[in-house]
Image: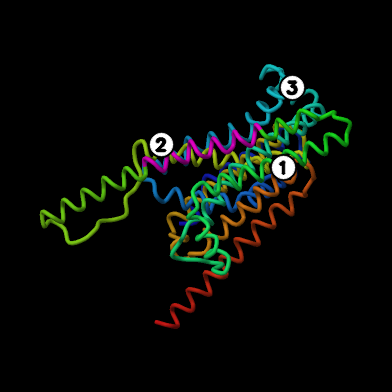
Amino acid sequence: MLLKTFRWAFAVTAVGLAAGVLYDGWTALGIVAILSVLEISLSFDNAVINAGILKKMNAFWQKIFLTVGIVIAVFGMRLVFPVVIVAISARLSPWNAVDLALTDKDRYQELVTDAHPSIAAFGGMFLLMIFLDFVFEDREIKWLGWLERPLARLGSVDMLSVCIALIVLLASSLTFGAQAHQHGGTHADKAETVLLAGIAGLITYMVVGGLSGFFERKLEDEEERENEAEEAAGRTGGRGAPVKLAGKAAFFMFLYLEVLDASFSFDGVIGAFAITNDIVLMALGLGIGAMYVRSLTVYLVRQGTLDDYVYLEHGAHYAIGALSLILLVTIRYQINEIVTGLVGVVLIGASFWSSVRRNRALRTAA
């Protein structure tokens, strides 16, 4: 099962490492390997969240996520996205941006770094909304009950998560504005850029998440009516298997997953510049890492890991909350990628261990 699930990831690893050697020798192989590990460590929480969403989708859309989705993740976010950032921020054509990435790597890295505040604001707000909507929802299973119970009660206040997110965004933009003032106003327009990018992230979350939720509820209502009709006709004694999303519901959930993956990849793309400013090596390394994240997502779904270890999803969402705040903090301060990766690993590891202890306690009680 393990080998079958990860076979494509292993194949891409071999091809990617070989391509690195052919491109720039054995040093490039080491850089590609380091970037792969960086991407995997930063995106483990992404795999857990993806698995929680992917298990709701039918087999066809799961396959779409693993085929079309991986093309978008590897080619789009790890190769095209950094070029688009430079093209927009420097007002260059995409072809000129590619030429710059290949011929003047230092200038290319400088332009991407200049665009970091808007990237961090967009991704930070999108991820923050995911975290807030999770902790403000009243759930039967609670990991940190002392914290989650009062937060669930607060969640009964309409639009609370949006209000908190906007307050955080406003504080972030004002903080960056203060920094710009200290630097003589050379980045005075960045505070406004942060604000606009953050609002764009919030709108993206609300539109894509709202549409996917709408069609999911619509599909569940239809399933409920079918079950009631069958029960009235005496053809079944109970509810069938949990509904699997298809059609429009699955399509919008797929879009939600892709935007989510994009938000998670921001820190990996930006962090990669601490290792290399070569766009080819960056695409190879991050692409290999993205394949492992996809394979891990499938493994979690097929093994039913989230059902067996019930606190994993909680740990992943807390990691999302931490990552969103880290992204917003990096608008002004630099934070080492090792810290970012370790926060997620520690939170998910703690939730996994709590799940193991819970399962042992339940078996003992039985």
Is label 2 in a helix, a strand or a loop? helix
Residue contact between numbered discs 2 and 1, judged by CB atoms under 8 Å = no
Q: To which residue does mark 3 refer?
A: 90
Q: Residue at x 42, y 37 (%)?
A: 211
Check if residue 173 falls in the magenta segment: no
Q: To which residue does mark 2 refer?
A: 251
Q: Residue at x 60, y 48 (%)?
A: 164
State the residue in front, 13 or 160.
160
Q: Is residue 31 visible?
A: yes
- In screen coordinates, is 350 left or right of 38? left
State the residue in front, 319 or 179.
179
Q: Amino acid at mark 1?
A: Ser
Residue contact between numbered discs 3 and 2, judged by CB atoms under 8 Å = no
Which numbered disc, 3 or 2, marks the residue that appears first in the sequence? 3
Report the Cα–Cα distance between label 3 and label 2.
34 Å
- In screen coordinates, is 130 left or right of 31? left
Give the crowd class for mark 2: few <14, some 14-19, many >=20 residues within 10 Å: some
322 w.r.t. 358: above or below: above
- Mark closer to the observer (3, 1): 1
Please report the bounds of the magenta region as a residue range: 196-215
Q: Amino acid at mark 3?
A: Ala
Residue 93, quarter of the rendered image: top right
Check if residue 211 falls in the magenta segment: yes
Give the crowd class for mark 1: few <14, some 14-19, many >=20 residues within 10 Å: many
Residue contact between numbered discs 3 and 1, judged by CB atoms under 8 Å = no
265 w.r.t. 319: above or below: above
Q: Amino acid at mark 2?
A: Phe
